[in-house]
Image (cartoon, rainbow, N blue to C red):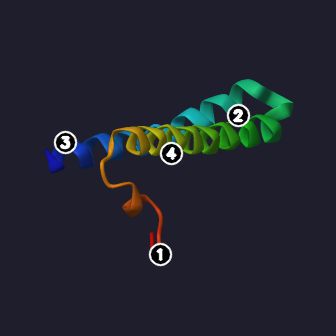
Amino acid sequence: MLALLVLLGGEGFGMVPPLQSYVRHVAGTASALVSALAAASFNEGVARGSAVGGLVLNHTSHYRGWLWPGPS
């Protein structure tokens, strides 16, 4: 299971440079804007995924105090 997780993570991160290169090639003169938007959309996906994961844990966990650092 761990090997599959490492493989999936490597494949996910391995797709970013070729995709960025292709998008910058297609964008032409607006390549800086497109590159910035691609990075921003990646960060938005991370933030949304974290928020959804937090909501799922908040609604399904019996131990609500461990979700926040410090004393609960």
Label 3 or label 1, whichever lies nearer to me, is: 1
Indicate the quadrant where residue 72 lies.
bottom left
Q: Is residue 35 above or below residue 67?
A: above
Label 2 or label 4, whichever lies nearer to me, is: 4
Looking at the picture, how far across and down is residue 63, in whole percent?
Answer: 32, 55
Measured Cα–Cα span from mark 2 to mark 1: 44 Å
View extreme (left): residue? 1
**Position of residue 50 in the picture relative to residue 63 (left or right):** right
For the point 42% across and 58% down, which residue is it? 67
The residue labelled by disc 3 is: 4
The residue labelled by disc 2 is: 24
Q: Is residue 72 above or below residue 11?
A: below
Looking at the picture, how far across and down is residue 44, in whole percent?
Answer: 64, 40
Q: Earlier in the sequence, mark 3 or mark 1?
A: 3
What kind of element bears circle 3? Answer: helix
What kind of element bears circle 1? Answer: loop
Camera-side residue of 70 and 7: 70
For the point 57% across and 38% down, which residue is it? 48
Looking at the picture, how far across and down is residue 62, in whole percent?
Answer: 30, 48
View extreme (top): residue? 26
**Position of residue 36 in the picture relative to residue 45 (left or right):** right
Measured Cα–Cα span from mark 3 to mark 2: 31 Å
Q: Earlier in the sequence, mark 1 or mark 4?
A: 4
The residue labelled by disc 4 is: 50
The residue labelled by disc 1 is: 70
Query: What amino acid type is highlighted by mark number 1?
Result: Gly
Q: Earlier in the sequence, mark 2 or mark 4?
A: 2
